[in-house]
Amino acid sequence: MSATDTPKENLVMEHLVSLTYTEELTPILERYVDALIDGHIIGHKCPSCGRVYVPGKGYCPICVVPTTDKDEVEVSDHGTVTGFTIVAPVAYYGQTETEPFVYASVLLDGCDSNLGGQDIVGVPHDQIRSGMRVRAVWKPKEKRNGSAVTNRGWGSVASVIDAFEWTGEPDLERAKYEEHIF
Amino acid sequence: MSGATDIAVVGFAQTPAVRKARESEVQLLVPTVTQALERAGLDRREVGFTCAGSCDYLTGGPFAFVSNLEAAGAWPPISESHVEMDGAWALYEAWVRLQHGDIDTALVFGSGKSSPSKPDELWAQQLDPYYLAPLGVDPGSLAGIQARALLDAGKATERDFAEVVVRNRSNAKGNPNAQVAGDFSVDELLRAPYLRAPLRRHDFPPISDGAVAVVLARGDKARALCERPTWIRGIDHRIEVHQPGMRDLTTSSSTTLAARKAGYDGGPLDVVELSSTFSPQEIILRDALGLADDANVNPSGGALAANPVMATGLVRVVEVAQRITEGSAGRGLAHATGGQVMQHNLVCLMEGE
C-alpha cells in the first residue's frame, strides 16, 4: 500500500496520565498551618537582612542563610494588593471555575513576600487596583484546615482564609510596595 | 581530549541519602551548595555560571527547579541554566560554558526527592507515549528484561548479580551518605523472592532523597582555590535510541563511545564510580568500559547503596574527586546515566596534578 492509499481520518488515542504524590508538610509548614488554624499568620525573619517570608522557607533566598523556628515572627492579616488579574476561565480539565474570578497578590503588613492567588471581595472587579488596602476574611475556626497548604511554595491560605476584603482605607502609595510586586 | 581548557573540581558537598527527607528540596540544597562553595573558598557572588539538574515530576511541583535556584542566591540576577537531567549533565553544561574562557568558575548542583512520588508510575511516562507509556512499563520491569537478556546471552548469572550487591553494600559501610549498607552473603540474597524476575529486591536501588553540589574552576584559578584540584581530563555523553526494544540491552555502546571520546585509553584507574542503579548494569558497564576484574569499582557503594535520582550521577563525580583530592587516588572515572535502562550515558575522566 502506498502512502496515498492510507486512510485519511485522524487516529485519536486517549491517554490521560495520572500521577500519585504523597507528601507530609515540612516541619516549618506544619507550624504555619497550626498557627493559621489558630488565626495567626507566621513567617521567618532573615537574621541577616531582616526580610520576612510567609510562609517561612527555612532559609533566606536573598542572603542564602538558614532560618529556623527561632526566626519565627507573626505578621498582620491586613495588607496591600500589589498586583492582580481577572481570570476569564476556559474549560480545561480540572478547571472548576465558570465565572471570571480575581487572582491577586497580597503583601501583608510586616511581610516582604506576597500571598499569591487571593480573591478580593467587597468591590466590583473593575474597581480592584494595585495599592488597595485589604484585610483577611477568615473562615470560621471550625471550618479551617491545612488542605490548601502544600510543600510546593505557592503559599495558599484558601483553606483558612476565604478572601481579602477592601478595608476602605486610602490606597498605599506605589513607592511603599513596588519592590514587592512578586 | 585535545584543545580543551583545563577545568577542575575544586569543591563539593553532598547530603546523606535518606528514604524520606522532611525538608523541602531547596532546604536540602541550601547547606549543600553553601558547603561546596566554602570548601572551594569561593564567595557565591564570584561564581561565573550556575547550572542545576533536577526533575519537577519527582515532587510534582511545577517549576520546582526555579525554587531550587534560591540555594545559589539568584538575586542580584546571576547567569544560570537548568537541565531536566541528572546533575552530571549540569556539570557537562558548566564545563562547556567554561570553555568559552571569559569566566573562571562555575557552580553545579543536582537534587531530587523521590519520596513523594511513586517511581514505578512516574518513570513509565519517560517512555514513548504510544506503545510503552500507556502500558505503564516501570523501570524495574525493563531492568528485569535487561537482566533476562544478560542471562540468555550467557554473559552473567543470577549469582553474579548477587555478588555485585554484596560488594556494593559492603563498600557502602564506609560511606556515611549511604542508605543501604552491611554484610550479606550471596547465598542468603539468592534465597529472596523475585520482584521483577530475574531481579530480586536487593538488585534494585533504594528510593532516596538527596542533593549534591560541585564547584568548578579553570586553569590558574583552580590552582589558587585548591591545593589539589581534580582535573577533568575529558567528559563526554552519548545517547542511544529511545525505544528499548531496538537496543541490545546487554551492552552499552553509548558508554563505550563516551569513554573513548572523553579520552579514556583503557589505562589503569584508581577508582571508578558507576551509576548502575540495577545490579546487572554494573556488569554491562564494566564490560562497556573494558575494566579489569579487580578494578576498584564503586568504593562508595554506588547507586545500589544510595540513589537520589537527579543527583546520583553527580555524586559519582564527587566520590571520585574526593579520593583524588584526598590523595588516595590519582586517576578516576565517573559514569552517569539517564533514560530507561541506561539509554544515555556520560563519562568523566579525572586526574590529580
Image (cartoon, grey):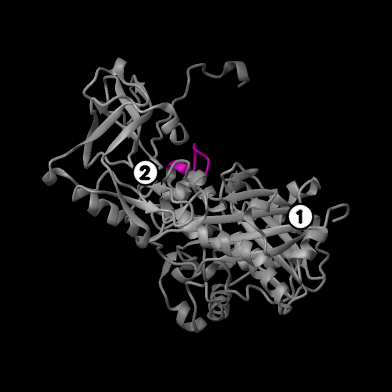
Name the residue beneath numbered marker 1.
Answer: B257
Name the image quarter holding the N terminus of chain A: top right
Q: CA distance from mark 2 to mark 1?
A: 54 Å
Q: Secondary structure at mark 1?
A: helix
Q: Where B156 falls versus B247 (above or below)?
A: below
Q: Which chain is indicated by disc 2?
A: A
Secondary structure that dominates the magenta span: loop
Whether B152 is among the magenta residues is: no
User: Where in the figure is residue B320, as x and y percent of width and height?
Assistant: 68, 69
Amino acid type at image mark 2: Cys
How many other residues sit within 10 Å of disc 2, few (<14), some (14-19) or many (≥20)? many
Residue ID at (55%, 19%): A6
Q: Are marks 2 and 1 on the same chain?
A: no
Q: In terms of image quadrants, where is residue B351?
A: bottom right
Q: In terms of image quadrants, where is residue A133?
A: top left
Of badges 2 and 1, nearer the viewer stands: 2
In the picture, measured across the screen, residue B244 lies left or right of residue B234, that is: left
Name the residue beneath numbered marker 2.
Answer: A111
Residue ID at (24%, 20%): A123
Of residues B351 and B32, which is closer to you in this image?
A: B32
Residue span colored magenta: B126-134
Whether B130 is among the magenta residues is: yes
Residue ID at (71%, 58%): B216
Q: Where A5 falls versus B157 (above or below)?
A: above
Of residues B44 and B31, which is closer to you in this image?
A: B44
